[in-house]
Image (cartoon, rainbow, N blue to C red):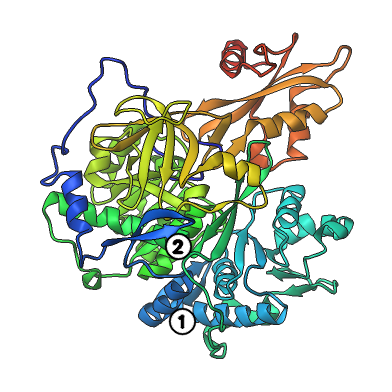
Amino acid sequence: MSESAELLTPAAAPRPAAASTPPTGSSPWAAMSLAQAHTLMTAPGSMFEMAQATIRGIPTRVWKNAPPTMRDVFVTARATHGDKTYLVYDGERASFEAFARATLTLAHALAEMGVSKGDRVAIAMRNLPEWPVAYFATLLLGAIATPLNAWGTGPELLYGLQDSGACVAVVDAERWDRVAGLLADHAHECAGLRQVLVSRHAAPIDHAQVKALESIIGPVASWATLPQRPLPAVVMGPDDDATLFYTSGTTGRAKGALGTHRCSTSTLMATAFSTHRSFIRRGEPVPDPAARPFQRAMLVAIPFFHTTGCQSILCNALHNGTKLVLMHRWDAEQAMALIEAERISAAGGVPTIAWQLLEHPARPKYNLSSLEAMSYGGAPASPELVQRITEVFPMAKPATGWGMTETSATFTHHSAEDYVARPASAGPALPVGDMKITDDDGNALPANQVGELWVKGPNVVKGYWNKPEETAATFVQGWLRTGDLGYLDDEGYLFLVDRKKDMLIRGGENIYCSEIEAVLYKHPAVVDAGVVGVTHPTLGEEPAALVVLKDGAHAEPEELRAFVRSHLAAYKVPVRVVIRPELLPRNPTGKLLKPVLKQLLAATPLIS
């Protein structure tokens, strides 16, 4: 995966040998080939009919029946799903109607604070019911919703506020406590930040520019009684700016990926298309959602600040009437209790979560028969995981896929028998998307040859916020250069084999090694540092560091880990630090030889 890939990562795929013969034609289980299914499903008059639109000067296939904007998604969901439960969190419940009233109330309050079309509203909080309220209230004003990584440190959150130029920030108590002092010290750098709304803070905050979010929308239990408010009178269209999700950049600093309403609404069609495709390929009728015995429900273990958690899960649930059950933090047994109590039909997240549900000794105590899907991504998953899901939960279809922040989450989707047949693949592109594998000069390579993955489609973002050089290097004539190395088989299934840039993924979280190296270099005893990924059975990869100390200096590995922890989020802290006696190996241009570093790390006893 590339440095900016956010979830929906496929299983690890081996590089094809020169003499290998990947599968061709339709899978043995399918009555209809992939190409035939796509042709049938996108035919004129169908739910997934395609049209052509010109996006930033590039003719692009689009979903003809996708909602024009996220405001349309909001309006239709309220009218269609009103009294159904939308959000569940620690005993709190909100219907689609209650959520809509809270969202409109906040939207009008934001407008009174001066928020208007094109302004950025930052959101920094854990998965709380207030998160989607802040997100959609921003979108209804034509403003740009700007989720910040809630796992970030105070300086990392401050950077997001500064870089985005947010005029309002909506945060929870923990995020406020992290950033409050920094805002006071850096007021001139965040001069445009006019208001901070803090949710669930135990004590009143004595600050002129800070207000309790509850003073505007009240607690979740009262949302249904909020007065009716009209939609803000804002003109917006499919290609208006809507989102600013942050992803790691080539310098180690986060980049804001600027997405449009069309980017978001295109993603809404992905999961539905993949699910329908499985039935079509089996030769079976697609079930009528209205005939379901109980409401679809999903256990949410992916942060909403990830584009997958927001666009693929949160927004998709609003669109199709799914109940979202939120957890304060992941706990496998609590998750199983919720699956039973709330009749959860879909669960997953990163492969770690799927493994924990499968292997937990308390699993037989709970009725998990409501599960219909187990989806995951964000870190490499072994093919064995697919097999285990089919054995333990035979009614739950496994699913994965590939996507990036820059593709507004899902670009390929892989599920059910297709995934079982190709467990090392990320699946095929959706019909509105194109993929090609290129050499170093950007020339397309034939099937089964490894090169860099380029993609294009209506869900590819406009570019990077205020970073024209990075935008020009990554977005080329409508194509997005992903930085991922992989190949396409004869039927168009994607197999990823490596990452072109130095990036690792720990349990769904992107970690840029140079960022950790830069922090280690700040330690007064360190003269040289290199960070690489080490394999973890469930998290995929974890960071580990090799460090060289200055002559006469002394530092213990745990001291260095604590030093990194004081500067970066906990998930970026190396799980192991090895102190080396000589400078680390580099190539003639001075770049670290990361494969050699991994060998040195593997050869060093754990007592280091």
Q: Residue furthest bottom?
A: 227
Q: Which residue is mark 2?
A: 262
Residue 88 relative to residue 589: left or right: left
Is residue 429 found left or right of 254 in the rendered image? left
Towards the viewer: 459 or 550: 459
Categorize mark 2 by other alpha carbons within 10 Å: few (<14), some (14-19), many (20+).
many
Question: Given the image, on which type of amino acid does mark 1 rest?
Answer: Glu
Q: Amino acid at mark 2?
A: Arg
Residue labelled with disc 1: 97
Residue 428 placement: quadrant: top left
The kind of secondary structure element at disc 1 is helix
Mark 2: secondary structure: helix
Residue pictured at 74% horizontal, 51% vertical: 159
Question: Is 30 situated above or below 104?
Answer: above
Residue 500: x and y in percent read 52, 28
Which image quadrant is residue 77 in? bottom left
Q: Is residue 210 above or below residue 182?
A: below
Q: Is residue 4 visible?
A: no
- Gap between marks 2 and 1 measured at Cα: 24 Å
For the residue carrying disc 1, how many other residues have a C-alpha within 10 Å: few (<14), some (14-19), or many (20+)? Answer: many
